[in-house]
Amino acid sequence: MEFCLPLVLFLIYLPALFAQVQDTAYTGIEVDGTRAAAQVDKNFICATIDWWPHDKCNYNQCPWGYTSVNNLNLSHPILAKAIEAFNPLRVRIGGSLQDRVLYDVESLKDPCHPFQKRKDGLFGFSRGCLRLSRWDELNLFFRKTGAIVTFGLNALHGRHPIYRSAWGGDWDSSNAYDFIKYTVSKGYQIDTWEFGNELSGSGVGARVGAEQYGKDLIHLRRIINELYEKSEIKPSLVAPGGFYDQKWFTKLLQVTGLGVVDIVTHHIYNLGAGDDPSLINRILSPHYLNKTAATFNDLEQTMKQHGPWASAWVGESGGAYNSGGRDVSDTYVDSFWYLDQLGMAAKYNSKVYCRQSLIGGNYGLLDRNTFVPNPDYYRLDRHGITGYSTFYLLMLSDIQTLVLFVFGSESALLWNQLMGEGVLSVKSDASPFLRIYAHCSKGRVGVTILLINLSNQTEFILKVENNLSDLHIIRTTNHRQSSFTRGLKRAVSWVGRKSSDDPLYREEYHLTPANEHLRSKTMILNGTPLGITKDGNIPKLEPALVDENSPISIVHRSIKFVVLPNFDAPACA
Ligand SMILES: *[C@@H]1O[C@H](CO)[C@@H](O)[C@H](O)[C@H]1NC(C)=O
Ligand SMILES: *[C@@H]1O[C@H](CO)[C@@H](O)[C@H](O)[C@H]1NC(C)=O
Ligand SMILES: *[C@@H]1O[C@H](CO)[C@@H](O)[C@H](O)[C@H]1NC(C)=O
Ligand SMILES: *[C@@H]1O[C@H](CO)[C@@H](O)[C@H](O)[C@H]1NC(C)=O
Ligand SMILES: CC(=O)N[C@H]1CO[C@H](CO)[C@@H](O)[C@@H]1O
């Protein structure tokens, strides 16, 4: 019997072996351009600046360097250019230590010390302090770079631990009051004041009950109303900047009621700890990625029911917690997670998405040491040429090395340039490994589709249909090509179809890793590595122009933005 076993095993595994051969799946997707399923803010992309000092360490690494609110080098030319490239970028100032920050206003009685390591301190640090001279510098910098600022206030000030991680007592608003007053007197523009960081639900490090939190928010609302009474621009109030907890969030909305909280922020770290060996498997698992949809959906329901006056933001999301994963959060593979989550957040009506972090940790969009405008830091300028758009890359800095190449920023920039405010729903019969998101194109007619192919073996060939037409979805998955191409010929409902023989084009931005290595730090756009040229410039970044009636293909483990300028979508008009 024994010697039969290998044969049996061989027979069992035979189909599996064949299944691993590269394959192709034909699929139809239908984009509903008749109405926007959701709407994001004009400035959806946001990145955070944290308070962590250089000696914040995880897993025997100290990946923050000098990137804190208090010591980030604001005169580094690359930093300003990186922010300006988004034109504008939202910046959220906050993080774990924000609730322990004192503002060095005149009335402050305590000395203004920086954060210091302390074993018994919350998150292992003492309280810290923001000097007003630094606050002045920061505001000059934000004004210069056009950043739209969200500032997180110290919601633990005046409270004390009561039981385990639970903190009690009223918030002492005096320090924040004088700080906001100073900010108003200087004419510094703060778009949104946020209250607290990760104190909701069971909290991270510390938690505060929803009832108490709501009371303090009502108080803060009064302060803001009072201090901004004579101002033309009135900042919004944002809270609680913590993990979603249905009971806690519901209670907070009930206690505060209409006219207190304008924006509800929640945090997401859905990939696990930064040193988790399964990070990459999670990033590539559609099932795992999609789990976050449940959170988005629950929050959307809670908001509809208890706070229809407020909108939702992802206030902080970095994938892997505790500073991100080294050689994961800063490589190509991270874009699968990041772009998928941007798409999902938008679909569930999040108006803004703040990526942890702009700089600092392993998940920074910029290298913490060199600020390398990662060769992926491009500005895209659009010029209308013969009806199409041509994109030019402006080089932001001469960089000596291509090695430090951080992907989130490239992905974020492409999203920022291409994806508009209207979110469109997509029907598809594709495998779950093909993640699809559609938005109105940014700043022009038509729609843009984001395709994320997580499959390690399947290339998808798609036919995009407009449901304005009376065509039904052609269910062609894995059908033979002939029936698929027959279906293609029936594609209609594109605007601008000329009777002339001129072909109409779509634009494609295809992102793949160098050397097919998922953890590569070099990104390939339309077959060209994104690197600097001999003379120290970054090459032009142009979309591939493709006959719009040809099927769209996307190879395994890659990402593509497809701009369809002639797609007739009344919702985007
Ligand atoms: C594709 O992934 C599956 C499971 O995720 C794995 O079993 C298989 O070996 C992979 N195939 C290739 C060609 O890498
Ligand atoms: C900040 O960056 C600039 C430009 O690279 C550099 O000249 C300066 O020394 C830096 N300052 C600090 C404090 O590191
Ligand atoms: C993702 O999750 C949402 C909500 O739980 C569900 O409606 C949707 O069908 C899921 N999508 C996929 C592709 O599994
Ligand atoms: C388009 O799709 C939406 C839902 O996605 C549906 O409500 C609408 O009836 C569809 N329109 C047509 C013409 O099929
Ligand atoms: C690993 C991987 O995804 N490889 C594919 C990436 O995309 C290119 C085409 O752009 C394919 O040739 C690779 O096989």
Image (cartoon, grey):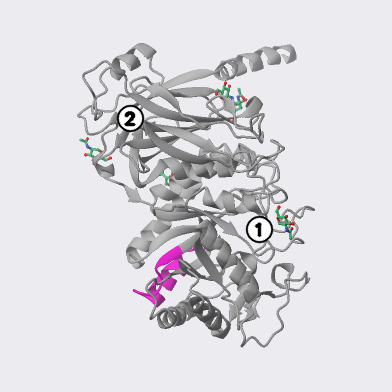
Q: Quadrant of residue 312?
A: bottom left
Q: Which stretch is magenta?
A: 243-264
Q: Residues within 10 Å of mark 1 (few under 14, many from 20)?
A: few
Q: Position of residue 117 (x, y in %)?
A: 78, 69
The verdict on label 1 being within 8 Å of ligand 2 is: yes
Q: Are marks 2 and 1 in contact (CB under 8 Å)?
A: no
Identify the image quadrant of the C terminus. Answer: top left
Q: Position of residue 216 (x, y in %)?
A: 48, 80
304 to the left or right of 241: left
Is residue 569 or residue 166 the one in the foreground?
Answer: 569
Q: Residues within 10 Å of mark 2 (few under 14, many from 20)?
A: few
State the residue at coordinates (64%, 52%): 77
Residue 259 belongs to the span the image colors magenta: yes
Residue situated furthest front in the rendering: 535
Q: Is residue 253 above or below residue 354?
A: below
Locate ligand 5 by image quadrant: top right
Is residue 145 or residue 335 the one in the foreground?
Answer: 145
**Can residue 203 be seen?**
no
C-alpha distance separating marks 2 and 1: 40 Å
48 to the left or right of 71: left
Residue 387 image label? 2
Q: Secondary structure at mark 2?
A: loop
Q: Amino acid at mark 1?
A: Ser
Identify the image quadrant of the N terminus. Answer: top right
Q: Position of residue 336 (x, y in %)?
A: 54, 38
Q: Which residue is mark 1?
A: 75
Is residue 241 or residue 535 the one in the foreground?
Answer: 535
The verdict on label 2 being within 8 Å of ligand 5 is: no
Residue 28 belongs to the span the image colors magenta: no
Q: Quadrant of residue 34?
A: top left
State the residue at coordinates (69%, 12%): 4
Q: Amino acid at mark 2?
A: Gly
